[in-house]
């Protein structure tokens, strides 16, 4: 039964799906191709990956050679795992940093992976049969070390992306690409399963691995193709990296307090601009504007968003999102103390204070005060 299901999947279902996704990745229109050149390049790489996967499955079916119990096949599984880890890591990082994946970098990384795999198979071929298992062990270790490197590399760029989003938007716009870390760590999980599969090749592990892989590849392909609809919203901060500050715990709840000396690097121009920003917040309650971004503030100040970001970072020592949310939390606390929640809901409070929703309000409020909005109400009664 397992063999029948495996043959059905590998001969018809999975190759058909991989072929369809590969064609879509190649042929679907990409608007503003110049602005999305990294994405266009990464999508071609993904298209090749899907088509190669399809071709490999078809070749296996026609050759009637099952990948059961052969050390050479285990080496092939590791090689496929390394290739997959490389392609998915670099394609996903390209979405987080549009200047990252140049053709030169792609060539260099591809060369490293290709040479490593080639060396492993040459050593496997020239070693005596009773020593080949040690080549397989070394190749497996190399695979694990490479995966650890890719995890560290991805985390570095995802942290950078989060900083950019939090320094540009007042709400959690970074969640628009939340699927990217999900996709990456899902691919990492598939890679671990591939390693286990290489060490324990059986019909059952074959079937489980193929099912896991096809589900992951399908979900990933759909989200990857939908990136063209996400990019316009996050394009500006990705294209123009502003000053990055990650400390979000510096500013007291009394946002009217003068803490311009928070950072000695603040210039007189920074301080003057900061005073203008403070007036917008205090006199016009600009922080209540839904979907407020630093570009909105910069337009009102007649400055670029980079200059505004620098002023906030230097004068307050925090990023834009934290700065705006400090005002929102302070206003929410004031309304709660005046009995707002006796007649309104948390959703209404979130809307009144500029938060995108009650979840955003709850998280920001608890992070700042240490208690939830309802607990704050209890404390002030």
Image (tube, grey):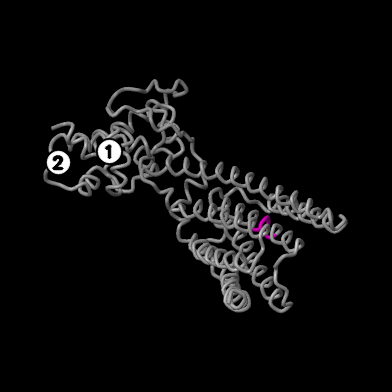
Dot 2 surroundings within 10 Å: few (below 14), some, or many (20 or more)?
some
Assign the N terminus to one quadrant of the image. Answer: bottom right
Contact? badges 2 and 1 (CB < 8 Å): no
Assign the C terminus to one quadrant of the image. Answer: top left
Query: Looking at the image, how many numbered discs can be counted on the residues?
Result: 2
Q: Quadrant of residue 300?
A: top left
Q: Is residue 82 magenta?
A: yes
Does residue 88 appear left or right of residue 301 in this picture? right
Q: Which mark is residue 103?
A: none
- Residue at x 26% of width, y 43% of height: 288
The magenta stretch is 80-84
Q: Is residue 354 magenta?
A: no
Going from the N terminus, do you reach mark 2 or mark 1 first?
1
- Rendered position, 136 above or below 2: above
Q: Secondary structure at mark 1?
A: helix
Dot 1 surroundings within 10 Å: few (below 14), some, or many (20 or more)?
many
- Chief secondary structure of the magenta span? helix
Horizontal and vertical percent position of residue 149: 64, 44
Q: Which residue is mark 1?
A: 328
- Rendered position, 125 above or below 368: below
Horizontal and vertical percent position of residue 271: 39, 25
Q: Which mark is residue 340?
A: 2
């Amino acid at each position: 039964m397992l063999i029948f299901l495996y043959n059905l999947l590998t001969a018809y279902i999975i190759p058909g799906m991989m072929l369809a996704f590969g064609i879509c990745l190649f042929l679907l229109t990409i608007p503003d191709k110049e602005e999305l050149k990294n994405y266009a390049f990464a999508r071609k790489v993904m298209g090749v990956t899907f088509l190669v996967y399809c071709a490999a499955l078809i070749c296996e079916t026609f050759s009637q050679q099952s990948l059961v119990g052969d050390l050479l096949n285990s080496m092939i599984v590791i090689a496929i795992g390394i290739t997959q880890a490389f392609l998915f890591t670099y394609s996903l990082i390209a979405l987080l940093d549009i200047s990252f994946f140049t053709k030169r970098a792609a060539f260099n990384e591809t060369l490293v992976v290709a040479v490593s795999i080639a060396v492993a198979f040459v050593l496997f071929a020239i070693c005596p049969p009773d020593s080949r298992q040690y080549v397989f062990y070394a190749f497996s270790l190399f695979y694990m070390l490479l995966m650890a490197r890719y995890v560290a590399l991805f985390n570095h760029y995802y942290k950078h992306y989060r900083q950019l989003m939090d320094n540009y938007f007042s709400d959690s716009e970074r969640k628009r690409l939340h699927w990217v870390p999900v996709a990456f760590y899902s691919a990492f999980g598939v890679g671990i399963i591939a390693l286990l599969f290489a060490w324990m090749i059986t019909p059952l592990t074959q079937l489980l691995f193929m099912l896991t892989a096809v589900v992951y590849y399908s979900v990933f392909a759909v989200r990857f193709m939908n990136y063209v609809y996400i990019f316009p919203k996050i394009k500006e901060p990705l294209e123009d990296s502003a000053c990055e500050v990650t400390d979000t715990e510096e500013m007291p709840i009394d946002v009217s307090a003068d803490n311009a000396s928070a950072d000695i690097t603040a210039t007189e121009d920074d301080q003057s601009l900061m005073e203008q920003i403070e007036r917008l917040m205090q006199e016009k309650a600009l922080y209540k504007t839904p979907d407020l971004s630093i570009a909105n503030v910069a337009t009102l100040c007649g400055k670029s968003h980079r200059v505004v970001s620098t002023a906030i970072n230097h004068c307050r020592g925090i990023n834009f999102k934290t700065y705006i949310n400090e005002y929102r939390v302070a206003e929410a606390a004031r309304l709660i103390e005046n009995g707002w929640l006796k007649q309104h809901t948390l959703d209404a409070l979130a809307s009144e204070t500029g938060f995108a929703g009650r979840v955003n309000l709850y998280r920001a409020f608890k992070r700042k005060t240490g208690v939830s909005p309802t607990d704050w109400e209890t404390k002030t009664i």
